[in-house]
Image (tube, rainbow, N blue to C red):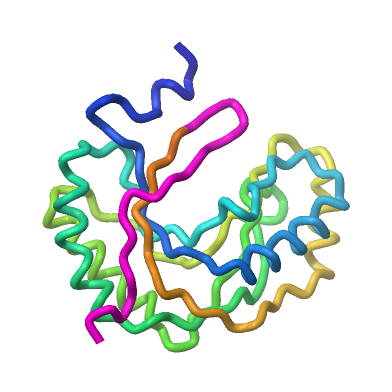
Amino acid sequence: MTSATLYNSTKDEIRSFLALDLPGQVTNFLENVSNELKKSRADVKWVNPRSIHLTIKFLGNIKRATIHEIETTLKPIFSSHTPIQLKVSNIGVFPNPRQPRIIWAGIEDPTGCIIRMVPIIEDAFFEMGFAKENRPFTPHLTLGRTRSSEGRERLISIMSGLICDSPVFTIDRAILFQSVLNAAGANYSALSVFKLGESR
């Protein structure tokens, strides 16, 4: 049994997370940013831009029977919020430039819609028995994860000179995804789709 198998879905459970779906114009923008960063030849496992989502909450393995409860609970929350205007505004690393482990693109939320909505969603999941996230929510998109220090200085140098400022885009849906791990990474498929502003 591989380590990936240990974390994958079983017959009765599904590895899942809730995320905001990004429009094609954003994934194209992120692909261009990643291509610039790849010029560093740093030892990074880059995320396929088509697989990047704005994660709201990682749920881990959930029982298949829980999906209906999640749908019933979240649908009125998302339908009561209008579509969100966002933009990609900068890039950075976690935890710091001296030891970069995760390369990310930051999200600018001018109206504060996400910051107001996430605590409501956290409370809803808590009522369903999920643990609350202790860290404050910081909207960002993971572009890649470093595997070693090779090319680190070149990567940080390119990042410091790269202007990362996308056009404003609209998010009109959230998706409950299933995540299946494999040797190449992870495959995502939609379990439920929640339209924003549907009740309006």
Image spot of residue 40 (x, y percent): 86, 50
Which of the 4 image quadrants contains residue 82?
Answer: bottom left
Which of the 4 image quadrants contains residue 183?
Answer: top right
User: At x 48% / y 24%, what residue is drawn?
Assistant: 4
Q: Which residues are magenta?
A: 181-200
Image spot of residue 168 (x, y percent): 59, 83
- Quarter of the image with the N terminus is top left
- Quarter of the image with the C terminus is bottom left
Image spot of residue 88 (x, y percent): 61, 74
Looking at the image, residue 177 lies above or below residue 121: above
Residue ranking furthest to the top = 1
User: At x 77% / y 63%, what residue is drawn?
Assistant: 32
Report if residue 18 lies within the magenta region: no
Looking at the image, residue 51 lies above or below residue 63: below
User: Would residue 171 be found to the left or right of residue 10 on screen?
Assistant: right
User: At x 64% / y 44%, what residue is drawn?
Assistant: 145
Looking at the image, residue 52 lies above or below residue 63: below
User: Would residue 17 be found to the left or right of residue 184 on screen?
Assistant: left
Q: How would you classify the magenta stretch by its main secondary structure?
A: strand
User: Would residue 177 be found to the left or right of residue 67 on screen?
Assistant: right
For the residue pair 96 and 109, the one nearer the viewer reads as 109
The mark total stands at 0
For the residue pair 134 and 141, the one nearer the viewer reads as 141
Image spot of residue 125 (x, y percent): 20, 56
Report if residue 188 lies within the magenta region: yes
User: At x 53% / y 64%, what residue is drawn?
Assistant: 140
